Amino acid sequence: MTLTDRLGIELPILQAPMAGVQGSELAIAVSRAGGLGALPCAMLSPDGVADELATIRTAGSGPINVNVFCHTPPAPDPDRRARWHAALTPFYAELGLDIEAVPADSGRRPFDHAACDTLEPFRPEVVSFHFGLPAPELLARVKAWGATVLSTATTVEEARWLEAHGADAVIAQGLEAGGHRGLFLTDDLTTQMGTLALLPQVRQAVGVPVIAAGGIADAWGVSAALALGAEAVQVGTAFLCCLESRTSAIHRRALMGETARHTALTNLYSGRPARGIVTRLMRELGPISERAPAFPLATAAIAPLRAAAESRGRGDFSPLWAGQNASRCREAPAAEVIADLSRGFIC
């Protein structure tokens, strides 16, 4: 059975789950066009997840991939938090904000039994994990309703670990990919490879299907990934400006302008490395900083800065997530993006 058969989709194209910039509308549109739509749940409340899944099921658009994080919550570190606040204080003063009012908790919780309780009534056909896999008993619950389990690997070692611990397919995430790196066995960024280097090595190392992600934005990229052994591709950045996405006007302008050519990995916005368009915050503090609290605690102090700057029409402190290839970003229906991506292998 091919991966597309197992996932119940016509085309070997998965829409990357992109928390904060999309919801059910994009997932429905992608699935209706023959790909696999995804619902990112990392920033949604349980009620929010249920509402979005109810909308998707009512639409009857086909299989859905529900994406969750399975990070280990960090222990509070008052000293590191104080250093982080000191680094951000000049920005707070500039915008007339009180850094002492920043809450300590970011609100992002890893996948747990309560989250599983929310998903189970909807029985999503695919559940994908970022930052490894959950505890065995949670994974068993997901598989019990027949879900196909995907997870992200950024190294060969991570791919082997995922296969050994129950992943049904591995997403090989190249260094070009936008958003959060899925790394979980190491924090060493020197281990990270580009998609065309990582993909064939992962394909040789594991027996489960491999999905290529990172830098794929057109039919040529899809064809290259399939030629290197991927059974499907996962595409994110090319969907960010779709009519069905919730990407902000500030983010859209950046994606469709020259600034999108300059991206970098940064830990300033969440505490974990993620690729986005270089912003003022990244330039002035450096994209990677030891002062940033561990994921997801860095987010709390960034949120007020982001909101204040965006209210003034500026993205100085906004996480403008994007991969290294934003060349296909345009305001168009998701179905058009799917058609363009599939042109290389559909007669």
Image (spheres, rainbow, N blue to C red):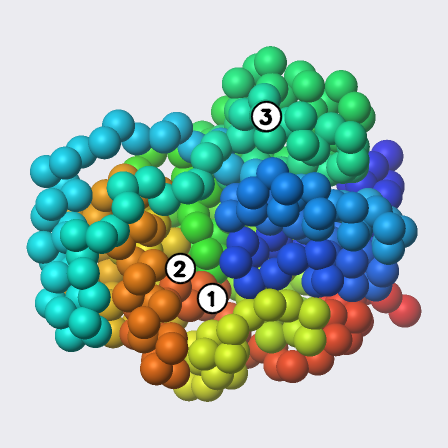
Residue 322 circle label: 1
- Secondary element type, mark 1: loop
Q: What residue does disc 3 label? A: 114
Compared with 134, 131 (above or below) is: below
Q: Are marks 3 and 2 in contact (CB under 8 Å)?
A: no
The answer to whether 100 is drawn above or below residue 309 in the figure is above
Q: Position of residue 181 (x, y in %)?
A: 43, 48
Q: Is residue 215 left or right of residue 233?
A: left
Residue kind at label 1, given as amino acid type? Ala
Residue 233 percent location from the top left of the image:
66, 53
Q: Secondary structure at mark 3?
A: helix
**Quarter containing the N terminus:** top right
Q: Residues within 10 Å of mark 3 (few under 14, many from 20)?
A: few
Q: Nearer the viewer, residue 168 or 61?
A: 61
Location of the C terminus (image quadrant): bottom right
The nearer-to-camera label among 3 and 1 is 3
